[in-house]
Image (cartoon, rainbow, N blue to C red):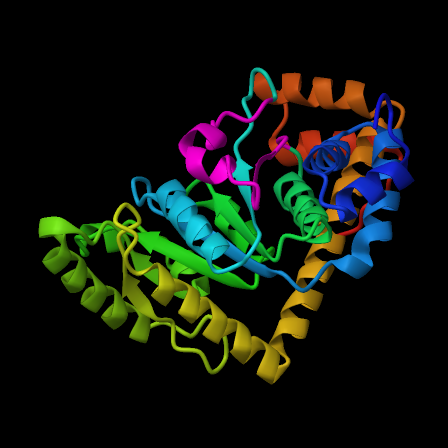
């Protein structure tokens, strides 16, 4: 594949497991150019029949929980069990350069070098719904390339987790030994959505502390609604550096998957995710179309100036922009 590959060439490369073709396909999907987006959607539509069977697992956690170490250790363990593992990292985007700012392959050197693994950062791009859209498309392309486990890592506990929960079938929350203060700092929303909680770094003299933390987290979870109907969120301890607890983590993920399949909730969850994706894409397209209307760009600049100079309130300035666009919005 040289030069500008056709959609069919990219498709054939992706479904044959060509890693270079997969990387080029994801880059195409991430492009903001209208012609690239048209080609990307044609490509994704072409590979859709080969998607959907993979285990989609999200991993998030407090800073210092060792997410990358857990992903690398779990990924290598899964490969030993015969799986092919793709890792997608929801990266923040540099406000200056527009590029993603994490060096994920340098943090997962052993996994990234393995022929049955693929690691790809997914920069947010700073656009409405951008993180979810790009990561979804990258996930579909990885599945079409034959990866049967897709691990999606978020950069921390915050807004990205709400989007992450809308991407995956099972959400794993990573914590560290020493409950109490850490528990207070975790937003209730992400705890409620976690399908599995893992206390990492349970090794050496931290094992007793990890066991106490496990008990505290279990108690806290009893006071919250279940993430999935009929599912009691397990709390486990593990040490990614020593490779302990990995089999138990995967066993819980598989039990959760079995529950989703048996109850029909997997189909329901994925349909809901498709609807959320559609909604975010419509909002993004509508915003883009609105900003492209004649007079809107100038009206926005004037509104920003008027607000800064305290000539208008924000609602008044907003209405001026709406008026300039020619739209009529009724309360």
Residue drawn 29% across the image and 40% down it: 64
- Vertical position of residue 9 compared to residue 222: above or below: above
Image quadrant occupied by the N terminus: top right
Q: Do we see residue 210 in this rendering?
A: yes
- For residue 65, which quarter of the picture? top left
Identify which residue is drawn at 87% across, 24% down.
Answer: 4
Q: x, y (%) of residue 282?
A: 79, 48
Q: Please tell me whether residue 105 belongs to the stretch shown in magenta.
A: yes
How many tags in the picture? 0
| Magenta range | 99-126
Q: Is residue 319 left or right of residue 96?
A: right
Residue 157 visible: no
Report if residue 113 lies within the magenta region: yes
- Nearest to the observer: residue 2 or residue 298: 2
Residue 281 in percent (x, y) is at 76, 47
Horizontal side of residue 250 vs 309, given as left or right: left
Looking at the image, is 115 positioned above or below residue 178?
above
User: Residue 36 is drawn in which quadrant?
Assistant: top right
Residue at (39%, 56%) from the top-left corner? Answer: 173
Where is residue 44 shown, x and y percent of the image?
A: 81, 48
Examine the rendered structure and indicate whether residue 314 appears above or below residue 117.
above
Position of 262 with respect to 183 (left or right) is right
Above or below, comparing residue 299 to residue 46 in the picture:
above
Tell me where residue 69 appears, x and y as whole percent.
Answer: 36, 42
Instruction: Please tell me which residue is depicted at 50% across the width and 25% down the height of the picture.
Output: 101
């Amino acid at each position: 594949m040289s030069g500008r590959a056709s959609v069919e060439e990219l498709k054939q490369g992706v479904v044959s497991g060509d890693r270079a073709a997969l990387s080029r396909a994801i880059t195409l999907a991430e492009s903001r150019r209208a012609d690239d987006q048209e080609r990307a959607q044609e490509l994704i539509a072409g590979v859709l029949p080969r998607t959907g069977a993979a285990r989609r697992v999200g991993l998030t956690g407090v800073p210092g929980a060792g997410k990358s170490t857990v992903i690398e250790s779990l990924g290598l363990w899964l490969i030993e069990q015969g799986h092919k593992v793709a890792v997608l990292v929801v990266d923040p985007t540099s406000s200056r350069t527009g590029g993603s700012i994490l060096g994920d392959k340098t943090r997962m050197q052993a996994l990234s070098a393995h022929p049955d693994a693929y690691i790809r950062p997914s920069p947010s791009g700073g656009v409405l719904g951008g993180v979810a859209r790009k990561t979804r498309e990258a996930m579909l392309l990885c599945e079409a390339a034959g990866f049967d486990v897709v691990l999606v890592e978020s950069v921390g506990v915050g807004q990205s987790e709400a989007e992450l929960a809308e991407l995956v079938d099972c959400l794993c929350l990573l914590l560290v030994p020493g409950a109490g203060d850490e528990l207070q700092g975790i937003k209730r929303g992400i705890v409620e959505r976690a399908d599995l909680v893992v206390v990492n770094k349970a090794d050496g003299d931290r094992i007793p502390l990890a066991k106490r933390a496990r008990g505290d987290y279990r108690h806290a979870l009893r006071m919250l609604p279940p993430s999935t109907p009929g599912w009691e969120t397990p709390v486990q301890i593990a040490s990614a550096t020593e490779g302990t607890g990995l089999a138990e983590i995967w066993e819980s993920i598989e039990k959760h998957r079995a529950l989703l399949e048996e109850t029909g909730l997997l189909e329901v969850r994925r349909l809901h995710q498709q609807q959320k994706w559609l909604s975010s894409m419509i909002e993004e397209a509508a915003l883009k179309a609105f900003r492209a209307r004649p007079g809107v760009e100038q009206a926005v600049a004037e509104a920003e100036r008027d607000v800064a100079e305290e000539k208008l309130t924000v609602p008044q300035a907003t209405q001026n922009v709406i008026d300039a666009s020619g739209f009529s919005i009724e309360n």
